[in-house]
Image: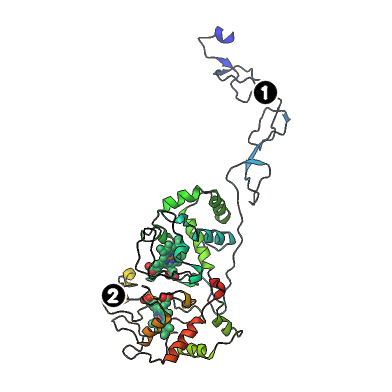
């Protein structure tokens, strides 16, 4: 009636949507609103009704609905993305004789991060067609290398470098045979997008991971983030890689006085550690590498792969490659940056020959042209010693 009477004017009525007589056509409030007497009277609730007089336990709350979070709100029905998780430090023990591992301040190792990194490392979701994971080329039982001379990527394209071992890589100060990157975090960006490896884009990886409820939860727990980005993917992977510590070989037990080496192994140890074999200059310390680059006399100039010089552009670095650790060497064949040697016998034959002279050959390759002149027995002893560096627990080989 009212409406008809003033049909030329704006419609009047109750304009408050929470009122029981809310008139959605009304444009002018005429003070006629009636309010429910019952409703949620708690001002912290999401459906708080300021006009309600009596609470009817209808209050609804938003907040963190994850019961494993630190700020879990038992009353919350709607999750507002505010959940926070505390992480548990993962302590990497420094093995006897090892230096302390340098861990970046902005990526401390946590149990949650390591478990997430381990899952990512083994997940084919990172590769373009979901056919390859990091572990396709870095297999645990092979000291986290692969058994091929060169590895094939998802498109079947073969690279020109042998897959590196990841044994104790947390102690490395540079990565890849030519030292092209200087942290595990930085390194992990590369294989995902490398056209001859996993041939993916980070945008694609991020889209897939953010569509995966399990990963959203795991990233939240490890890093307190609601959106997964590439930075946190590589951070988790690097955390996992730092836990790949190998320090329980027969040789370690010998050093600790818990196991004897055979006569042949001891003879090999002496050759390795003396001027006779001269291995220790570059493969010294408990890490069996020096975090440095050398030309160990593999080739004549010009070099097919110039190694370190491709990064430094310094011709004095031609043919220099990062010294690899010799831990688990028995299982990381084939050997050298290009996997040219398939057995330790071939490696020892190379060093025994004294190596090939070139302008950048390392001064510690002292027997160029003369050779080490090891007897057959001494060569066998050296190999027997190298095999004492196998850590079956690490490789999960029994
Ligand atoms: C198709 C095989 C392949 C895949 C897949 C692969 N890698 Fe590699 N990886 C290699 C090869 C080959 C090298 C040596 C590269 C070079 O020196 O140029 C290498 C080197 C490395 C190194 C350097 C180790 C060192 O001490 O120098 C790390 C670390 C590494 N890979 C981690 C990863 C991670 C993490 C992934 C997954 C995101 C991955 N790789 C996927 C083949 C692969
Ligand atoms: C001048 C430094 C130097 C000396 C001395 C040296 N090495 Fe090496 N070694 C290297 C470098 C650098 C590489 C990697 C070279 C490459 O791939 O181009 C290497 C590679 C190796 C490899 C292959 C590792 C792998 O993962 O592919 C083995 C095994 C090895 N050395 C054993 C020895 C033994 C045994 C001796 C002593 C007889 C010795 N080395 C002496 C620097 C040295």
View quadrant of ligand 1: bottom left
Instruction: Identify the residue at image location x=55%, y=55%.
Output: 223
Above or below 321: residue 66:
above
Residue 172, visible in the rendered structure:
yes
Which of the numbered marks, if any, corresponds to residue 303?
Answer: 2
Percent from the top left, x then y, of residue 104? 50, 65
**Dots 1 and 2: beta carbons under 8 Å?**
no
Above or below 172: residue 17:
above
Q: Circle 2 — which element?
A: loop
Residue projecting furthest to the left: 302
Q: Circle 1 — which element?
A: loop
Quarter holding the C terminus? bottom right
Q: Nearer the viewer, residue 48 or 97?
A: 97
Above or below 277: residue 306:
above
Q: Nearer the viewer, residue 85 or 390?
A: 390
Quarter holding the N terminus? top right
Q: Image quadrant of residue 336?
A: bottom left
Q: Badge 1 is on which residue?
A: 35
Q: Image quadrant of residue 6?
A: top right
């Amino acid at each position: 009636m009212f409406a008809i009477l003033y049909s030329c004017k704006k419609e009047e009525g109750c304009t408050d949507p929470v009122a029981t007589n809310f008139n959605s056509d009304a444009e002018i409030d005429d003070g006629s609103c009636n309010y429910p007497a019952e409703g949620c009277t708690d001002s912290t609730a999401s459906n708080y009704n300021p006009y309600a007089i009596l609470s009817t336990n209808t209050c609804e709350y938003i907040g963190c609905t994850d019961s494993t979070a630190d700020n879990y709100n038992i009353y919350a029905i709607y999750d507002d993305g505010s959940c926070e998780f505390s992480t548990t430090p993962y302590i990497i023990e420094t093995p006897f004789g090892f230096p302390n591992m340098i861990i970046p301040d902005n990526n401390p190792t946590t149990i949650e991060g390591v478990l997430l990194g381990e899952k990512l490392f083994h997940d084919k979701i990172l590769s373009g067609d979901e056919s390859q994971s990091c572990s396709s080329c870095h297999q645990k039982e092979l000291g986290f290398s692969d058994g091929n001379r060169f590895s094939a990527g998802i498109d079947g394209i073969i690279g020109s470098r042998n897959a590196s071992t990841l044994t104790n890589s947390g102690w490395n100060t540079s990565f890849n045979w030519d030292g092209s990157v200087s942290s595990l975090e930085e390194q992990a960006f590369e294989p995902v997008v490398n056209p001859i490896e996993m041939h993916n884009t980070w945008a694609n990886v991020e889209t897939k991971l953010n569509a995966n409820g399990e990963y959203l939860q795991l990233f939240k727990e490890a890093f307190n983030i609601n959106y997964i980005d590439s930075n946190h993917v590589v951070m988790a992977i690097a955390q996992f890689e730092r836990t790949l510590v190998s320090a329980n070989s027969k040789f370690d037990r010998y050093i600790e006085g818990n196991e004897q080496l055979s006569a042949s192994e001891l003879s090999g140890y002496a050759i390795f550690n003396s001027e006779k074999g001269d291995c220790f200059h570059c493969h010294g310390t408990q890490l069996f590498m020096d975090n440095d680059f050398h030309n160990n006399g593999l080739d004549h100039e010009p070099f097919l792969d110039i190694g370190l010089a491709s990064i430094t552009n310094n011709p004095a670095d031609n043919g220099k490659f990062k010294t690899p650790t010799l831990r688990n060497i028995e299982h990381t064949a084939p050997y050298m940056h290009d996997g040219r040697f398939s057995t330790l016998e071939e490696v020892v034959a190379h060093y025994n020959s004294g190596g090939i002279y070139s302008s950048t050959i390392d001064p510690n390759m002292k027997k160029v042209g003369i050779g080490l002149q090891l007897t057959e027995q001494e060569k066998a002893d050296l190999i027997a010693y190298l095999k004492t560096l196998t850590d079956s627990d690490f490789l999960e080989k029994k």
